[in-house]
Amino acid sequence: MTTTKWSLDPAHSEVNFKVKHLMISTVTGKIEKFNVNVDASGDDFTNAKISFEADMKSLSTNNEQRDTHLKSPDFFDVEKFPKMKFESNAVTKNSDGNYTIKGNLTIKDVTKPLEIPVEFGGSAKDPWGNSKAGFSIETKINREDFGLTWNAALETGGVLVGTDVKVSAEIQLLAQVEQTA
């Protein structure tokens, strides 16, 4: 069986998030520095081993004051917990050709199981002969499940920061090494 190691193509990949603010609008942010590594059987990602790591110091909402607060102990505490990690433990191919990834997400010192639906965009060779594969991800996590519980009550009812965080990612992988086992 041939195993292919895939690495992130950072020029064609991004990770974004959205969360409600004041219960009336949405704040959008991104993780600017992250990495993905995949070991898969050829071009089929069924049963692949996937690891994701994000540098939480690279979190950005384009607002320095808000970013400083998000990086503080009230939220991500990036000095103590600089990385967010995901490790897969199962990847299944769905009847529509897309995938479901099951694994463990670690934020700060909390690890929880997470199931992620993944749209497979396909694979192709670029003009230089490199094999690429593309994926789109949209999921939602409850930030309080990971100890991100800071909030402020509003005088009109509700809270300053929503509980659900919508995460979206566009990931392009580059085939690195094929090994026969």
Image (tube, rainbow, N blue to C red):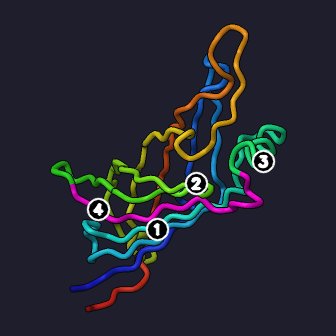
Comparing labels 2 and 4, the label whose residue is closer to the camera? 2
Which SS class for mark 2? Answer: strand
In the image, residue 38 lies at what x, y percent? 41, 72
Q: Is residue 48 left or right of residue 106?
A: left
Q: Quadrant of the C terminus?
A: bottom left
Q: Which residue is mark 4?
A: 91
The label nearer to you, 1 versus 3, is 3
In terms of sequence position, does the residue under pointer 1 or pointer 3 come before the other?
Answer: 1
Question: Gap between marks 1 and 3, in whole Å?
Answer: 25 Å
**For the point 76% across and 48% down, which residue is it?**
73
Ranked by sequence position, the earlier of labels 2 and 4 is 4
Regarding mark 3 in the picture, which secondary structure is present there? loop
Image spot of residue 27 (x, y percent)? 65, 31
**Kind of residue at disc 2:** Ile
**Disc 1 residue type (three-letter):** Ser
- Judging by the rendered image, the residue that carries numbered circle 2 is 107
Q: Which disc, if any, is residue 25?
A: none
- Could you tell me what secondary structure mostly forms the magenta stretch? strand
Front residue of this view, candidates 130 and 104? 104
